């Protein structure tokens, strides 16, 4: 293990531990990631003694600042390219109404027992008498090799004490592509109600980490199969299932959504595009109708879905800012490129899509490509070819007509000045006519053509030109 302890911060910790006659250990994620061959810049250090005092002494030797968090009994410093957090070894006990532990000083054994999973309980000694020695009391290395998420102690107690660990188990399974131990799965199912004592912010933080994993469907399948999704995100759980009437069914929108999510993850790391994939069909359950002679329909699910987005973001404590508006826009527009790809693409339809999507047109096209989940290779090829035609048309129309983030060549002030009128209904009528004329290709997106069109439309509704616009 010594080869993994070459960073100079370990040497300083080791020498100081000898000077103070204390034991020091690297523990948790940094040690785990050594065996996963994953780079890690966050190092957790456990001291058998006062972690804050030790951290302050290390900071003095390194000539860096230390941040102390007395409420948590921790201290943190940054040195070169790593962030190091120190804590004294401790044991914990819990009350049933809180996931905040009662903390007492403890041994290394106590500290490892309080860890969430065996793969996070691995420790490497840093003091000189044992420097580089791996301490693995719960078989964490074997679990890494078997790709298993397992708790050091009884999982029922582990998850009951801190219910957020249920979300963390699923998150690690999703991030690492590991399986969760069957006993732990059963413990999650029996402790589902305990998640209600965890703050929404902490739940959503874990949910976002699942969404940002390489293949989020792993995590969402665990969330659904354990029943956790039904509690933390019931609108998504409601997508599950296929109803059959008169021999006619429809695709399972839950598993379709997971496929769209995995698809879009192959092309973007953007959290909010991934949220758009999750929510693109979120309104299918409330809009589902069976039409005799036709089958199942979901008319207007894109409009209703867009209206659901702010409520869901509020419920999950996600940001209600431009990120939410992007997701809302993509949900609203996600059918448009698909419709264009299935028919002869007119310039006016492309202009309208560019006008409504603006700078988010590329994101919209990524979502729409991800939305093709058919197993029929002929259909996949057809859709992809049609999407390429749509994208080329978008590019051609944009270069020619400059519609993206469109600003009218004639403003409301121009119209008022031209006809000598104030704000009112006539201004709005003319502005709408100008926009429609440009989007339909009746006039070019140019000021002179728009001025002539404005004069003509103004005269049609009884207005007279009283000034020029130069």
Image (cartoon, rainbow, N blue to C red):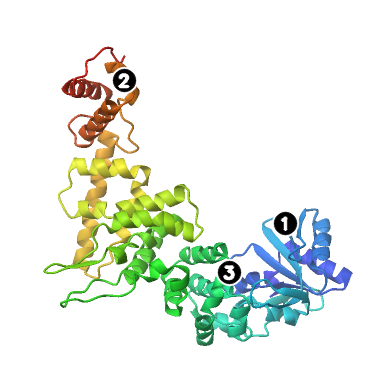
Q: Quadrant of residue 27?
A: bottom right
Residue plotted at (26% across, 26% down): 426
Describe the element under mark 2 as helix, strand or loop: helix
Give how far across and how far down residue 224 sits, in percent. Answer: 42, 75
Q: Nearer the viewer, mark 3 or mark 1?
A: 3
Residue of label 2? 416
> Is residue 158 or residue 34 the one in the foreground?
158
**How far apart are the alpha carbons under marks 1 and 2?**
63 Å
Query: Mark 3: few, some, or many residues within 10 Å (few <14, many ≥20)?
Result: some
Pick whichever of labels 3 and 2 is earlier in the sequence.
3
Residue 21 seen from this side: yes
Give the position of the C terminus as an image quadrant.
top left
Residue of label 1? 79
Query: Mark 2: few, some, or many residues within 10 Å (few <14, many ≥20)?
Result: some
Residue of label 3? 198
Classify residue 422 as left or right of residue 63: left
């Amino acid at each position: 293990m010594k080869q993994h302890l070459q960073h100079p911060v370990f040497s300083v910790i080791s020498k100081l531990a000898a000077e103070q006659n204390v034991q020091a250990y690297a523990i948790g994620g940094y040690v785990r990631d050594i065996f996963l061959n994953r780079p890690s810049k966050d190092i957790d250090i456990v001291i058998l003694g006062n972690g804050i005092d030790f951290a302050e002494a290390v900071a003095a030797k390194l000539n860096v600042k230390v941040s102390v968090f007395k409420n948590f009994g921790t201290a943190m410093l940054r040195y070169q390219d790593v962030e190091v957090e120190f804590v004294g070894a401790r044991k914990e006990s819990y009350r049933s109404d809180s996931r905040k532990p009662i903390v007492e000083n403890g041994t290394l054994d106590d500290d490892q027992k309080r860890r969430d999973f065996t793969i996070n309980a691995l420790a490497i000694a840093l003091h000189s008498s044992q420097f580089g020695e791996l301490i693995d009391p719960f078989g964490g290395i074997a679990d890494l090799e078997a790709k298993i998420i397992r708790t050091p102690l009884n999982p029922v107690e582990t998850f009951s004490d801190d219910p957020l660990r249920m979300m963390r188990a699923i998150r690690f399974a999703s991030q690492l592509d590991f399986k969760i131990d069957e006993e732990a799965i059963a413990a999650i199912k029996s402790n589902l109600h305990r998640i209600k004592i965890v703050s929404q912010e902490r739940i959503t933080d874990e949910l976002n980490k699942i969404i940002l994993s390489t293949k989020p469907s792993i995590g969402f399948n665990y969330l659904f199969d354990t029943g956790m999704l039904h509690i933390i995100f019931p609108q998504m759980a409601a997508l599950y299932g296929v109803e059959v009437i008169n021999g006619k069914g429809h695709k399972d929108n839950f598993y379709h959504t997971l496929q769209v999510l995995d698809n879009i993850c192959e092309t973007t790391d953007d959290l909010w595009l991934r949220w758009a994939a999750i929510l693109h069909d979120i309104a299918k359950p409330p809009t589902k109708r069976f039409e005799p002679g036709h089958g199942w329909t979901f008319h207007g699910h894109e409009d209703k879905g867009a209206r659901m987005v702010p409520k869901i973001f509020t419920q999950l404590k996600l940001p209600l800012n431009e990120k939410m508006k992007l997701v809302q826009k993509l949900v609203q527009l996600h059918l448009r490129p698909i419709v264009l790809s299935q028919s002869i693409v007119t310039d006016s339809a492309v202009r309208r899509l560019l006008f409504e999507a603006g700078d988010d047109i590329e994101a919209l096209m990524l979502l729409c490509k991800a939305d093709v989940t058919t197993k029929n290779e002929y259909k996949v090829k057809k859709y992809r070819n049609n999407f390429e035609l749509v994208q080329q048309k978008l590019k051609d129309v944009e270069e020619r007509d400059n519609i993206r983030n469109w600003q009218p060549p004639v403003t409301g002030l121009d119209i008022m000045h031209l006809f000598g009128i104030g704000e009112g209904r006539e201004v709005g009528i003319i502005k709408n006519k100008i926009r429609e004329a440009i989007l339909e290709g009746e006039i070019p997106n140019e000021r002179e053509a728009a001025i002539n069109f404005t004069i003509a439309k103004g005269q049609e509704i009884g207005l007279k030109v009283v000034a020029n616009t130069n």
